[in-house]
């Protein structure tokens, strides 16, 4: 099963109905996934949170900005807790990963990446967790990370490695045990906001421009143009598209691209 780019998640006006759509094989349309159960947020508020003297029933929707999918398993965040649904299951279930001290429901808690049964979840407080069994159990791998940082920007799988972007640079690992700090050709740590992966080739974009990891696993700049803060990075038709949340002076979203084909010819 594909990655998050192959799926579209949507929530109803109350956040109870989760729609999941699969990208068609020709890539031209989204097809609804059948049998997705209702996410009963009111029941969760009563059973899980009222006992903690926290009533979150004012929350209007799920955190569909935090979503991931792999091998018929879908993950989604709801008020600081990570839930999953496997195709054929009767309901959404908690993975057990939760942030008890996170009271601001408008802030995204988790940064997710999934490949097969392996899940990485970076929490808003700078802790990184790994699951090798589709979220049934978790291990805190934060102590193995080789650099200090404040928060996560993005996490992505490329081939057999996972790449973790932080506000102090990018680290990579194949197992979650040993990590490598990624730099450019002169040893400078590059801060990446968002990843995009094409097969085993990893791209990234940040304040200094757009980059590609070369065969030496070093960042190679392919463009120095940065329109503004990158909210999403996508590869399609040999182009690297950057979506921005804010264009300077315009206060509206924009979409920009560079040609990967032309860049390779240089």
Image: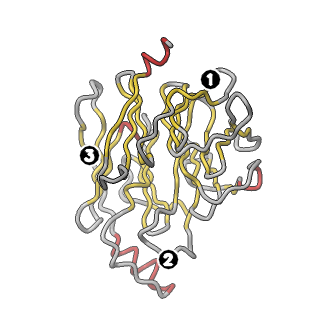
The dot on residue 244 is none
Q: Residues within 10 Å of mark 3 (few under 14, many from 20)?
A: few
Q: Nearer the viewer, residue 79 or 182?
A: 182
Q: Which of the marked residues, 1 or 3, is nearer the chain's N terminus?
A: 3
Q: The residue tagged with tag 3: helix, strand or loop?
A: loop
Q: Which residue corresponds to mark 1?
A: 214
Q: Residues within 10 Å of mark 2 (few under 14, many from 20)?
A: few
Q: Nearer the viewer, residue 76 or 196?
A: 196
Q: Name the residue rendered at 56%, 69% in the picture.
A: 99
Q: Residues within 10 Å of mark 1 (few under 14, many from 20)?
A: some
Left-right relation of 12 to 219? left
The dot on residue 34 is 3
Q: Name the residue rendered at 41%, 69% in the picture.
A: 106
Left-right relation of 18 to 93? left
The dot on residue 103 is 2
Are the two marked residues, 3 and 2, in contact with CB atoms closer than 8 angstroms?
no
For the question of whether residue 116 can be seen, the reply is no
Left-right relation of 157 to 75? right
């Amino acid at each position: 099963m594909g990655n998050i780019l192959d799926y579209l998640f949507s929530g109803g006006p109350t956040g109870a109905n989760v729609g999941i759509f699969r990208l068609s094989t020709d890539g031209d349309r989204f097809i609804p996934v059948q049998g997705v159960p209702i996410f009963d947020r009111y029941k969760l508020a009563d059973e899980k949170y009222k006992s903690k003297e926290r009533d979150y029933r004012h929350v209007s929707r799920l955190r569909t900005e935090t979503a991931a999918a792999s091998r018929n398993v879908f993950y989604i965040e709801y008020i600081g807790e990570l839930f999953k649904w496997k195709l054929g299951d009767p309901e959404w279930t908690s993975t057990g990963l939760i942030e008890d001290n996170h009271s601001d429901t408008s802030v995204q808690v988790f940064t997710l990446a999934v490949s097969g049964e392996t899940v990485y979840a970076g929490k808003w407080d700078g802790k990184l967790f790994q699951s090798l069994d589709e979220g049934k159990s978790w291990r805190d791998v934060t102590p193995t990370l080789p650099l200090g940082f404040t928060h996560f920007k993005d996490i992505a799988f490329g081939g057999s490695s996972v790449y973790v972007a932080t506000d102090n640079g990018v680290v990579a690992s194949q197992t979650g045990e040993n990590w490598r700090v990624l730099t450019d050709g002169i040893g400078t740590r590059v801060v990446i906001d968002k990843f995009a992966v094409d097969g085993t080739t990893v791209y990234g974009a940040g304040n200094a421009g757009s980059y590609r990891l070369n065969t030496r696993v070093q960042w190679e700049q392919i463009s120095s143009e940065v329109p503004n803060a990158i909210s999403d990075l996508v590869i399609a038709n040999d182009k690297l598209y950057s979506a921005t949340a804010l264009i300077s002076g315009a206060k509206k979203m924009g979409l920009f691209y560079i040609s990967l084909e032309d860049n390779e010819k240089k």
